[in-house]
Image (tube, coloured by chain):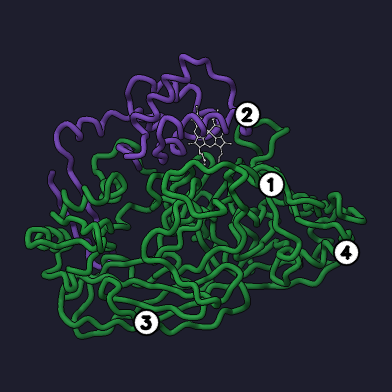
Chain colours: A green, B purple
C-alpha cells in the first residue's frame, strides 16, 4: 500500500488544485479565456517538451490549457490486492475496499476477475461464513404473488441458464475530475468492466413467483454488513424499474468467465443489470423484492446515485426533490493500448485499441484524434458480443514527425450523442463523467 | 519548484515533483496510522471518524465547511454516526475544511 507519507507530489495533485495555475507553474502556459486553448509560449513549449522528453510538440497550439498532458496523467503506481485474487488495481480506500483498474489492464475483450474493479459500500460477508450449498435467495415484496425461497442449485435446476458479456460501470467513474470536488471515492477511469456472466434471468424467476399488476420496481438485499456494525442497518439496497428487470440480459448470476464470482465482486450470487450504474447490480444477494413503489432503500434517496433534473452551475446546492435517479449510463470509451507514455518509432503505424459502451444503447461510431482534437478519423468498431456488452475498437495511427502526441478517442451512441472532450455537467456527487480518454505517445 | 521526469522504457513514465523546503517538511507531517495531516483537530477526527471506514475516504475529499457539515449530518441521519458535541464538531469541521478543502492540499 502506498504510505500516506509521500515524498513525491503527483502532477495530478497540482492540477487538481488549480489546473491553470499548475499549467502556468509547470509549463508557462496561460489559458485563453475565450477559446480555452492554451497559448504555448516559447518558454512553455520548452518546458512541456523538456518534461515529456520529446523533441517537439506537434500541434502545440491546439493543446488545451487545464489538461494534464496524458503522458503524465496516469503515473501513480498501482497497488496490489493479491490476497483477494486481484492484481494491479489502484486502491482508493481499504476499509471498505474500493479499487479501480488502470486502463492498460482493461485491454482484454473480457475483463478477467482479477482486473475487475471493486466498489464496496459495506463489509462483505466473511468467506468462511459463505456456504454455496446453503445460500438462499428469497423473492418477495408487496407486488409478489407467491413469495418463494431458492437455493442456488434450485435456481439452476428450475430455470434456464444464460450467459452474456455484460458491461458494468460505477455511476461515479470519473468523479475525480469534477471541480469543485464531488463527494465520494475519487474514481478516475477504472471503475468499469465487461465480463461473461452466467445465471438465470431475473425475469424468469420473478415471473415464476408472480408479478402483480401494480409492480413498479425491484429491490435487492445483500449479505454485506453496514460499516457501523449495526445489524439493523443495510449498507445499500437498490433496484431497477420493472422494465429494466424484465430485459433478457438482466441476470441473477453465480458465475463470471466460467468461474465462481470473486468474493469482492459478490460471491456466491449477485444481480447483474448491465448498462445502469453498477450499484443497481446487487452483490452477495439474499433477497429480491418486487415493489409497488420506487424502491426507497439506502442509497436510493437523497443525492445517492441521483443527478440534478436540470443542469446546475458547478458547486450549486441542489435540493433533494430536484434530484432524479440515474438510469442508463452515458456513452463512453477507454483506450487500453498503448499504455500512456509509450515510445513509438516514427514511420511505423501505432495500433490503438480500446472499448466503447453506451449504457442501454449500442455504440455507433468511435473516432480518434492524434492532433488534440483538430481532426478526427473513424476507428474500426466491432459489433457487441451481445446487447449490453462493450464494443472493441481498433485504429492504426500514423505520425508525421517526431514529438509528443496524444491519442484521443470519442464514441457516439446509437442516438447520435457523443462523448464530450471536457468534463460534462457538474453534479453534487460527481456522477456520469463520460469525457474522452487520452493517452500520450512519444514518437521518435 | 524542481521537476524531474524519469522515462522507464516503454512501461510508462514516473514523474516526481520535488517540493520546496517548506512543503517538503509538511510531507512528513502525516499521522502514520490514519494518514491524516497532523494539525490541530486531527486527533478528534481520528477519534470520531475512523471507526466505520478508514481515513482514506476522508483524505480523498475536498469540501468547504458547509460541505463537511452536510456530509457529517448525512452520516448522523442515515449512517449511524453518533452525536458530536458542538465544540468538538466546530474543531473537526475547521480542521477538515482547512486541510481537506476544495483546493485539496493533501489529496492522495
- Secondary structure found at label 4: helix
Q: Earlier in the sequence, mark 1 or mark 4?
A: 4
For label 4, count other residues whose C-alpha is less than 10 Å away and answer few (under 14), some (14-19) or many (20+). some
Q: Which residue is mark 1?
A: A237
Q: Which mark is residue B80?
A: 2
The chain ID associated with circle 1 is A
Q: Position of residue B69 (x, y in %)?
A: 49, 29
Q: Position of residue A306 (x, y in %)?
A: 58, 50
* Residue at far right of view: A146
Q: Position of residue A236 (x, y in %)?
A: 65, 44
For label 1, count other residues whose C-alpha is less than 10 Å away and answer few (under 14), some (14-19) or many (20+). many
Query: CB of mark 1 within 8 Å of CB of mark 2?
Result: no
Pick the front one: A43 or A405: A43
How far apart marks 3 and 4 lie (CA) works out to 47 Å
For label 3, count other residues whose C-alpha is less than 10 Å away and answer few (under 14), some (14-19) or many (20+). many
Q: Look at the image and tell me whether residue A402 can be seen.
A: yes
Q: Which mark is residue A208?
A: 4
The chain ID associated with circle 4 is A
Q: In this figure, what is the number of numbered marks?
A: 4
Amino acid at each position: 500500500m502506498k504510505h500516506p507519507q509521500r515524498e513525491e507530489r503527483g502532477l495530478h495533485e497540482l492540477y487538481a488544485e488549480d489546473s491553470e495555475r499548475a499549467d502556468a507553474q509547470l509549463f508557462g502556459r496561460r489559458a485563453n479565456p475565450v477559446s480555452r486553448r492554451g497559448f504555448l509560449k516559447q518558454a512553455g513549449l520548452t518546458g512541456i517538451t523538456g518534461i515529456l522528453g520529446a523533441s517537439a510538440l506537434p500541434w502545440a497550439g491546439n493543446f488545451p490549457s487545464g489538461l494534464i498532458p496524458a503522458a503524465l496523467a496516469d503515473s501513480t503506481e498501482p497497488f496490489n490486492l493479491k490476497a483477494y485474487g486481484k492484481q494491479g488495481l489502484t486502491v482508493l480506500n481499504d476499509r471498505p475496499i474500493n479499487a479501480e483498474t488502470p486502463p492498460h489492464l482493461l485491454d482484454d475483450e473480457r475483463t478477467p476477475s482479477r482486473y475487475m474493479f471493486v466498489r464496496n459500500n459495506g463489509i462483505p460477508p466473511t468467506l468462511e461464513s459463505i456456504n454455496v450449498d446453503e445460500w438462499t435467495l428469497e423473492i418477495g415484496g408487496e407486488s409478489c404473488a407467491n413469495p418463494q425461497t431458492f437455493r442456488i442449485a434450485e435456481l439452476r435446476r428450475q430455470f434456464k441458464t444464460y450467459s452474456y458479456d455484460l458491461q458494468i460501470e460505477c455511476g461515479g467513474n470519473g468523479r475525480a475530475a469534477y471541480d469543485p470536488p464531488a463527494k465520494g471515492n475519487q474514481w478516475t477511469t477504472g471503475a468499469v468492466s465487461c465480463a461473461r456472466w452466467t445465471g438465470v434471468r431475473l425475469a424468469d424467476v420473478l415471473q415464476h413467483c408472480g408479478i402483480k399488476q401494480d409492480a413498479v420496481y425491484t429491490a435487492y438485499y445483500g449479505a454485506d454488513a453496514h460499516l457501523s456494525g449495526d445489524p439493523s442497518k443495510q449498507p445499500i439496497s437498490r433496484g431497477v424499474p420493472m422494465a429494466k428487470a424484465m430485459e433478457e440480459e438482466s441476470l441473477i448470476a453465480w458465475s463470471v468467465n466460467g468461474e465462481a464470482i470473486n468474493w469482492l465482486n459478490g460471491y456466491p450470487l449477485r444481480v447483474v443489470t448491465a448498462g445502469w450504474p453498477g450499484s443497481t447490480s446487487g452483490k452477495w444477494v439474499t433477497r429480491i423484492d418486487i415493489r409497488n413503489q420506487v424502491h426507497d432503500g439506502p442509497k436510493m434517496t437523497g443525492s445517492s446515485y441521483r443527478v440534478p433534473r436540470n443542469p446546475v452551475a458547478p458547486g450549486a446546492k441542489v435540493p433533494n426533490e430536484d434530484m432524479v435517479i440515474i438510469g442508463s449510463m452515458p456513452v463512453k470509451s477507454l483506450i487500453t493500448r498503448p499504455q500512456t507514455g509509450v515510445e513509438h518509432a516514427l514511420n511505423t503505424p501505432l495500433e490503438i485499441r480500446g472499448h466503447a459502451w453506451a449504457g442501454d444503447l449500442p455504440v455507433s461510431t468511435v473516432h480518434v484524434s492524434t492532433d488534440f482534437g483538430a481532426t478526427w478519423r473513424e476507428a474500426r468498431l466491432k459489433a457487441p458480443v451481445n446487447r449490453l456488452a462493450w464494443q472493441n475498437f481498433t485504429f492504426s495511427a500514423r505520425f508525421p514527425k517526431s514529438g509528443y502526441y496524444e491519442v484521443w478517442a470519442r464514441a457516439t451512441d446509437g442516438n447520435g450523442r457523443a462523448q464530450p472532450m471536457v468534463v460534462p455537467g457538474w453534479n453534487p456527487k460527481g456522477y456520469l463523467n463520460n469525457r474522452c480518454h487520452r493517452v500520450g505517445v512519444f514518437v521518435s | 519548484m524542481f521537476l524531474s521526469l524519469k522515462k522507464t522504457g516503454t512501461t510508462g513514465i514516473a514523474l516526481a515533483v520535488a517540493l520546496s523546503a517548506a512543503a517538503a517538511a509538511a510531507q512528513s507531517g502525516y499521522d502514520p496510522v490514519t494518514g491524516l495531516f497532523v494539525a490541530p483537530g486531527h486527533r478528534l477526527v481520528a477519534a470520531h471518524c475512523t471507526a466505520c471506514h478508514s481515513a482514506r475516504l476522508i483524505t480523498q475529499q475536498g469540501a468547504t465547511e458547509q460541505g463537511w457539515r452536510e456530509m457529517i449530518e448525512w452520516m448522523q441521519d442515515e449512517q449511524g454516526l453518533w452525536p458530536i458535541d458542538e465544540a468538538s464538531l466546530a474543531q473537526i469541521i475547521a480542521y477538515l475544511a482547512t486541510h481537506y478543502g476544495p483546493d485539496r492540499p493533501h489529496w492522495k
